[in-house]
Image: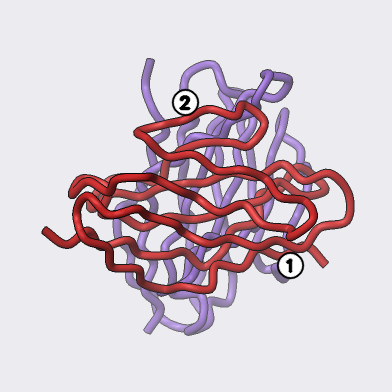
Chain colours: A purple, B red
Amino acid sequence: ETGVTQSPTHLIKTRGQQVTLRCSSQSGHNTVSWYQQALGQGPQFIFQYYREEENGRGNFPPRFSGLQFPNYSSELNVNALELDDSALYLCASSLAGDLYNEQFFGPGTRLTVL
Amino acid sequence: AQRVTQPEKLLSVFKGAPVELKCNYSYSGSPELFWYVQYSRQRLQLLLRHISRESIKGFTADLNKGETSFHLKKPFAQEEDSAMYYCALRGRDDKIIFGKGTRLHILP
């Protein structure tokens, strides 16, 4: 059983650019959630994907978008990057319908926007 | 509004002393509450959830609906308990809302 993986580990972009972050869910999981963790803060929910559809969204603007693929891996896309987008981006996978619906987290992608 | 508050950014406790990490929440309805832990250079992981009423690594947490609290406790701190601890609530739309976290530092 493989755990949640994310790529890349680190990324540096400049304001106005676009970025794509990737997440492979844990084997057997069908749901992926994305979180943004700014320095000194707890993770903040961005959105969740289940069966390739967005299934809940936090308080983030439309320039944050995502995809889920048939193999349940997922991408987070951020357009028109702003300095405040600098953060650790976490994805977590889970199995919908599981008794506890526990989310398992990846190691994160550290995004720096200059 | 759904909110999780962890009032302490840093808590330093001597080895062998009791630990209590505070967590208060705001939620209308029956909440599902969790404690997550992140050890140095490791990923965020679930420590315990209130519905299973378990003790993990000597830690327990009791949901107090009257005080809207879910404090994490351990009677005797160990050095390996040093980590970042996040209280979290599963809200509407199944999303998890995290507090800002408390860094627990166990002093030798």
Task: Answer with left or right where residue A30 lies relative to residue B84.
Answer: right
In this picture, is A63 found above or below A77?
below
Q: From mark 1 to mark 2, how far is it between C-alphas?
A: 26 Å
Residue A68 in percent (x, y) is at 63, 37
Q: How many marks?
A: 2
Residue at image position (22%, 58%) is: B106
Q: Chain of mark 1?
A: A
Mark 1 is on which residue type?
Answer: Asn
| SS at circle 1 | loop
Q: Earlier in the sequence, mark 1 or mark 2?
A: 2
| Residue B29 in sight here | yes
Residue A36 in percent (x, y) is at 53, 62
Camera-side residue of A39 and A55:
A39
Residue A26: mark in rendering: 2
| SS at circle 2 | loop
Mark 2 is on which residue type?
Answer: Gln
Residue A110 found in image quarter: bottom left
Residue topped by disc 1: A59
Camera-side residue of B61 and B87:
B61
Task: Answer with left or right where residue B29 lies relative to residue A60.
Answer: right
Q: Quadrant of the N terminus of chain B?
A: bottom right
